[in-house]
Amino acid sequence: MRLNADFSQRVVIRPGDSPWEASPSPGVTRRMLDRVGGEAARATSLVRYDPGSVFPEHAHPDGEEILVLDGVFTDERGDHGPGTYLRNPDGSRHAPRSAGGCTLFVKLRQFQPGDTESVRIDTTAAEWRPGLVPGLRVMSLHSFGTQHTALVDWAPGTVFQRHTHWGGEEILVLDGQFEDEHGVYPAGSWLRSPHLSQHAPRAPLGARILVKTGHLDADFLRRWAA
């Protein structure tokens, strides 16, 4: 399967633009955002566990990255509530489940070579730092090589200067409404902007977003050329 697999192109998926589809595990459904491959795929997805559902034990070749959006996600490392950020590196394994149900943002097989750090951050308790402009707060989650992942909180009325995305930018709007000159993106929207793209973002009503940068560079594009 190749879904939104031309990484040189900008992609926007708003809530309701893509359906929830069954996974191989009963009670676990997913909204595919981008994908290259079958069940063993380089993939970005929203994943929903119904109450009591279990996913079979599996390994994480090239890593797994998770943000718990709601509910409680459970595996051998414990219970992970809303706002928990997880990184499971290449070589790790788990058998995840959810007693009460949960929704996750998941990225598979997207770690850079040599990134072996296992990460668990409770973002509801972690420290925010001032951003580059008034009204902006940033919580760094992970950095390795050219890749950087963070939560960014925008107070109502915040405007950021026009800038270029070296290595691309990927955004999941968690709360509020994010905007730029290309459109308006309510909570639940996912945006992927290619290497060297530009925009001037703002949040007139306020927003909180998950941001990943530096992971769609020219070398990456050559490896995953459509």
Image (cartoon, rainbow, N blue to C red):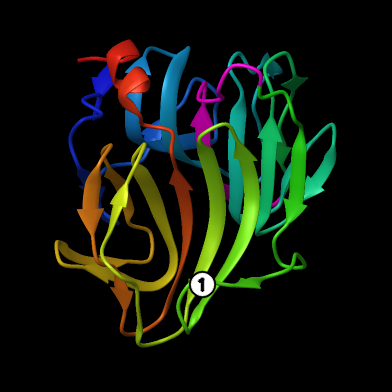
- In the image, farthest residue toward the left: 182
Q: Position of residue 143 (x, y in %)?
A: 62, 41
Q: How many marks?
A: 1
Q: Position of residue 54 (x, y in %)?
A: 67, 31
Q: Which residue is mark 1?
A: 153
User: Quick one: SS at disc 1?
Assistant: strand
Foreground pick, 90 / 162: 162
In the rendered view of the protein, which quadrant contains the C terminus?
A: top left
Would you say 101 lies left or right of 160 here? right
Q: Residue at x 44, y 44 (%)?
A: 213
First to last magenta residue range:
100-114
Would you say 75 lies left or right of 161 here? right
Q: Residues within 10 Å of mark 1 (few under 14, many from 20)?
A: many
Q: Is residue 79 visible?
A: yes
In the rendered view of the protein, which quadrant contains the N terminus?
A: top left
Would you say 225 lies left or right of 139 here? left
Q: Is residue 205 above or below residue 85?
A: below
Q: Residue at x 65, y 59 (%)?
A: 83
The image quarter in which residue 216 lies: top left
Foreground pick, 189 / 194: 194
Q: Amino acid at mark 1?
A: Asp
Q: Residue at x 19, y 42 (%)?
A: 10
Q: Position of residue 107 (x, y in %)?
A: 50, 33
